Image: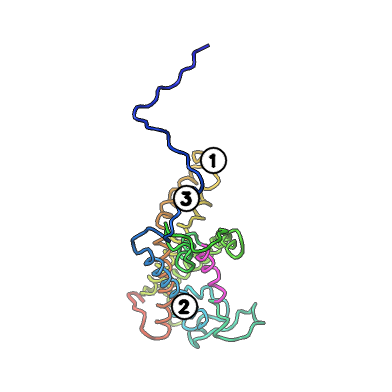
Amino acid sequence: MLPVTTAPPRPNAGPPAPRLSGSPRAKIAAKTLRKDNYKREPLITFAVLTAFVIYSTFRAFYGKHYFAEPYISPFFSPPLSSAVEHAAKYGNIGVPPHLSWLPTTEYVFTPAIWILVIPLGFRFTCYYYRKAYYRSFWQSPPACAVAEPHGKYTGETRFPLIIQNVHRYFWYLGLVLNCILTYDAVEGFIFHRDGGTHFGIGLGSFVLVANAVLLWSYSLSCHSCRHIVGGRLNHFSKHPVRYKLWTWVGKLNEKHMPIAWVSLFGVALTDLYVYLVSSGVFSDPHWIS
């Protein structure tokens, strides 16, 4: 039987650390010890998101000037009711046929009312946007190392925040809209004249393409997309294709925050561009027509 030996004490080890008793956290009366202007970022976020909500709500209920041949606003695509040419001529729309039992008020039941449910639901449940509006609207908390203002914390386990768990399903629906908006971007190069169609390039063509690219970037950089592509795998070596896709999505995911903001501005500016052209504020510049 081998003798039992003990390791020699380390030099300059010092006395053992004392045991802590009572609460493990220090009692600090101050809300935070931060000295920087940590409220600035939540205030900017609050202002920008509020401006977008006001603009998108106005456009959704206004329901006019969302088509300027061959461009259609992303807020109103796909068109759910009467032809977009009718909307361009008369500046209004009707009620979707399958919703004909609703009051036929042009300022209430526009296509955007139904279409925007998907992109707004996708962004509202987005992991990044949760952080953004939790901090800016609810101050919960307004920044790191700042005390939580609410006395009780239940996370996202109760109504209404438990609805955040449907984010993945909104991601799937968002892909469908991305495909439709990509089709719209292609249609933005097809002009109708003299009873026929021909290829053309206008400033609006590039606007629609840029909007589609930004929305695809936002969807593909999503945390849910990263998990769908590479999640629930025990061995990446056995799934080289999914691993490669996971690395690509991971690189996009690192830029998810700026992509989220740029794509949000992009979709609003695209709608605004179509509105200005459709309402006659200015003409769409053409290089090839």
Please identify, in this view, whether the residue under mark 2 or under mark 3 is nearer the observer: 3
- Residue 143 in which image quadrant: bottom left
Residue at figure coordinates x 40%, y 82% from the top left: 276
Frontmost of labels 3 and 1 is 3
Under mark 2, the amino acid is: Ile
Choose between 22 and 272: the one closer to the eye: 22
- 231 on left or right of 257: right
Q: Nearer the viewer, residue 144 or 50?
A: 144
Mark 2 and mark 3 lie on one chain; the one further toward the N terminus is 3
Q: Earlier in the sequence, mark 3 or mark 1?
A: 3
Magenta residues: mostly which secondary structure?
Answer: helix
Amino acid type of the residue that numbered disc 1 sits on in the rendered structure? Asn
Q: Secondary structure at mark 3?
A: loop
Side of 71 relative to 283 (left or right):
right
- Amino acid type at circle 3 is Arg
In magenta segment, residue 280: no
User: What label sits on residue 54 in the rendered view?
Assistant: 2
Residue 234's mark?
1
Question: Pointer 3: residues within 10 angstroms few (<14), some, or many (20+)?
Answer: few
**What is the span of residues highlighted in magenta in the rendered image?**
113-125
In the image as oriented, which residue stretches furthest toward the right?
A: 101
Element type where label 1 sits in the image: loop
